[in-house]
């Protein structure tokens, strides 16, 4: 019988330039609480054994706001992409053999049952990495999920690096993952920054899994709003409306 135990890793280092403020994106307030509060609560409510928060921009301020003793903070300076962010947690997760669920500090609407579904899907598929995916209405600039005929993921292509044909794919990457922890850090050690942004993409671990003959799986969630990242003040307002509607 497989264990449902996992550690949560929350990416919360970004500045959020499109929020029209110098304040760290995860400190912007949604219905009276900072954005990061919701990701931490989702991790706790799902039963995370350990919660690691990757901070960068205004890291001291984020630590002050979230001074809970059960949180482990790891600094990412400079910020060189999502893969680089996760690499910083290597020491905090050293020797851990279980699952790591990677969450985003700017995705406040994610429900614990969706995280549980992601973990269950990952285990049932016998995958080493499972990506939470969705199909939002276009046009958009999200990374596309490229699959084979069996439905396994071959790679995730960032919008800016995608061909015209790849941009026609409906299924996109939410930035939320369930990964076997030993594989995660072994794969990240192989990630390179040879892309337009010169960043280390976490998405590259999918191609590494395929190259090693391992299974990369997609867990499709129907509610694209639930997994929406907050990048603008308008999106923050829409998320507030969604939360209010959820309580009625």
Image (cartoon, grey):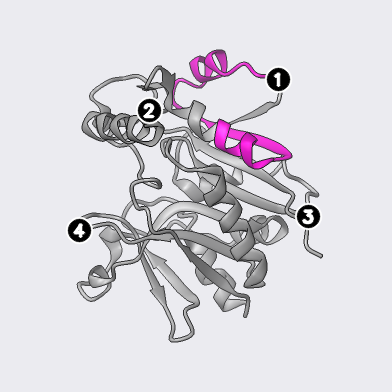
Residue under label 2, please give it: 25
Circle 2: element type: helix
Q: Real-space Cα distance between discs 1 and 2?
A: 22 Å
Query: Dot 1, crowdedness within 10 Å: few (<14), some or many (≥20)?
Result: few
Q: Residue at x 62, y 16 (%)?
A: 67
In the picture, residue 247 is in which quadrant? top left
The x, y position of residue 237, in whole percent, is: 26, 29
**Which of these two is toward me, 222 or 98?**
222
Give the mark nearest the N terminus, 2 or 3. Answer: 2
Residue under label 4, please give it: 138
The x, y position of residue 124, in whole percent, is: 65, 70
Q: Is 204 situated above or below 166?
A: above
Q: Is 19 situated above or below 172?
A: above
Q: Real-space Cα distance between discs 1 and 3?
A: 23 Å
Which mark's residue is nearer the viewer, 4 or 3? 4
Does residue 82 appear to the left or right of 229 in the view shown?
right
In the picture, residue 161 is in which quadrant? bottom left
- The answer to if 42 sits in the magenta stretch is yes
Residue under label 1, please give it: 69
**Which of these two is toward me, 54 or 248?**
248
The x, y position of residue 167, in whole percent, is: 24, 68
Query: Dot 3, crowdedness within 10 Å: few (<14), some or many (≥20)?
Result: few
Q: Is 47 situated above or below 34?
A: below
């Amino acid at each position: 019988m497989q264990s449902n135990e996992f550690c949560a890793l929350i990416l919360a280092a970004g500045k959020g330039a499109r929020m029209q403020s110098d304040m760290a994106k995860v400190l912007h307030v949604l219905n009276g609480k900072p954005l990061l509060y919701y990701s931490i609560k989702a991790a706790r409510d799902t039963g995370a054994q350990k919660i690691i928060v990757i901070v960068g921009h205004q890291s001291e301020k984020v630590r002050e706001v979230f001074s809970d003793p059960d949180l482990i903070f790891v600094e990412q300076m400079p910020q060189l992409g999502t893969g680089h962010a996760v690499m910083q947690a290597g020491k905090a997760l050293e020797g851990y053999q279980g699952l790591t669920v990677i969450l985003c500090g700017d995705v406040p609407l994610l429900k614990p049952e969706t995280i549980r579904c992601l973990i269950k899907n990952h285990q049932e598929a016998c995958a080493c990495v499972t990506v939470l995916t969705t199909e939002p209405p276009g046009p958009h600039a999200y990374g596309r999920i490229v699959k084979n005929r069996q439905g396994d993921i071959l790679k995730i292509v960032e919008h800016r690096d995608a061909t015209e044909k790849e941009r026609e794919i409906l299924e996109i990457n939410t930035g939320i993952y369930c990964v076997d922890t030993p594989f995660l850090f072994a794969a990240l050690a192989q990630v390179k920054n040879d892309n337009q942004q010169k960043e280390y993409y976490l998405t590259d671990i999918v191609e590494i899994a395929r190259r090693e003959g391992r299974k990369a799986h997609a867990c499709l969630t129907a509610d694209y709003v639930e997994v929406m990242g907050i990048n603008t003040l308008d999106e923050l307002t829409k998320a507030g409306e969604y939360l209010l509607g959820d309580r009625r």
